Amino acid sequence: MDNQSIQRLSTQQPDFESRLNALLDWESVSSAEIQQSVDSIIADVRRRGDAAVIELTRRFDRLDVQDMSALTLTADRLAQAWEGLPEEQRQALAVAADRIRAYHERQKPESWSYQEADGTMLGQKVTPLDRAGVYVPGGKAAYPSSVLMNVIPAHVAGVEDIVMVVPTPDGVLNELVLAAAHVAGVARVFTIGGAQAVAALAYGTETIPKVDKIVGPGNIFVATAKRAVFGQVGIDMIAGPSEILVVSDGGTDPDWLAMDLFSQAEHDEDAQAMLISWDARHLEAVAESIERLLPTLERAEIVRASLSRRGALVLVDDETQALSLVNRIAPEHLELSVEEPQRLVEQVRHAGAIFMGRYTAEALGDYCAGPNHVLPTSGTARFSSPLGVYDFQKRSSLIQCSPQGASTLGRTASVLARGESLTAHARSAENRIDSDKH
């Protein structure tokens, strides 16, 4: 095949390292021009509140609105969207929501404490955030699954007020997204997007309440704005393009694997789809499946661009070398399409979500398996985790000293504080030494 849609790599190639590095290289930092535009929008929203949001929505989403009421959807409107769906879609949303909720219920951390021999109590108190903001893409990229994945963990965590924003360019509402908001338990939605929506959630306006944390995917302007407001509010992550890495032992249907690669490549031209195997003939079979099936896709041009720019079929020497590459790449999605996935998974240290066995397509995780599909990208699985209940909660330390404990700890604290020349610290601790005898 002279006109290959996906490049081939082998660990035996002398330039393998440089070629792999070029494939993995992804810079999520926005241009100075975008940064300047976003900074200007944030400053405008902080200064003028609702008026700025309305004006920016008119300009960017081409909506002729006069006040915020025209950009607000109530719980009744969300319920109407739910009722208006075909039964099949309602059923699918309900099943997915139930499974996502059941999975995340198991994540809930508990508060705990213990008592030392002298009566001192130490512990940890888990508290939900007061208010979370969920950004949902609108327009062409309308993802009801993102609504479920971002809202349900917040609900399970105990967040009482969830504010959702979704842009509606040219006034087009996506009924499936609104229905997903209803089934996930959202009470109000503002039909705004872009950096102005992030700024409104971070700082608050006359109508839009200030939130404690902003989660959800968006374009480069949204990502840049999230980075800019971090510190004022919490954020989930700055996500890069979608990624899939498949490890195959040669026993999985090549057509299945080609479609698994396509499933991520169809997101956009920057998405990454890679397959690793130690079976050269199997890689050839997958390459042939790619060439044969690619023209049948509705998003064939996007997939072809993605595969040619950032896709690869990688031949390795053996299973050990494959796992070493997995941990180096730290993929967002990892498919272990092998006979004994349980054995291999023990050696995987870095991956956002791991799909085990030949029958577990990554696409199931995107919609309805249960675990969250908001995952670390661009190698950040080395130090980051999937979105979960814990992202909508915080932990407070509990310390309660008995008189005896205060006296004992006070002596240690005094020595350390004086060693740091912080004498007020020391004297504060010393005041309570042997205080039970006074």
Image (cartoon, rainbow, N blue to C red):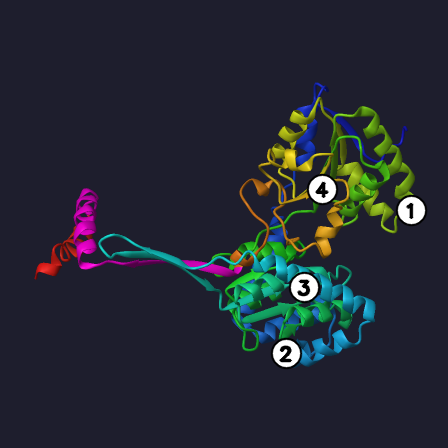
Q: Return the residue nearer the eye: 73 or 39.
A: 73
Q: Which of marks 3 and 4 is nearer the N terminus?
A: 3
Q: How far apart are marks 3 and 4 (CA)?
A: 26 Å
Please tell me whether mark 2 or mark 4 is closer to you in this view.
4
Q: Is 398 inside the magenta-drawn segment?
A: yes
| Magenta residue span | 392-421
What secondary structure is the magenta-colored segment mainly? helix
Q: Is mark 3 on a helix, strand or loop?
A: helix
Quadrant hosting residue 99: bottom right
Residue 316, placed above or below residue 104: above
Give the residue pinned by disc 4. 244
Mark 1 and mark 4 in contact? Answer it, CB < 8 Å.
no
Q: Dot 3 corresponds to which residue?
A: 98
Q: Is mark 4 on a helix, strand or loop?
A: strand
Residue 343 location in percent, x, y? 64, 34
- Which residue occupies 74% across, 70% down? 62
| CA distance for labels 1 and 2 | 44 Å
**Which circle, 2 or 3, is nearer the viewer?**
3
Question: At which x and y percent is residue 261?
Answer: 78, 41
Task: Answer with the quarter of the image where residue 369 lies.
Answer: bottom right
Residue carrying label 1: 296
Q: Tell me the residue that label 2 is attached to.
A: 68
Specify few, some or many for label 1: CA neighbours under 10 Å numbering under 14, 14-19, or 20 or more: few
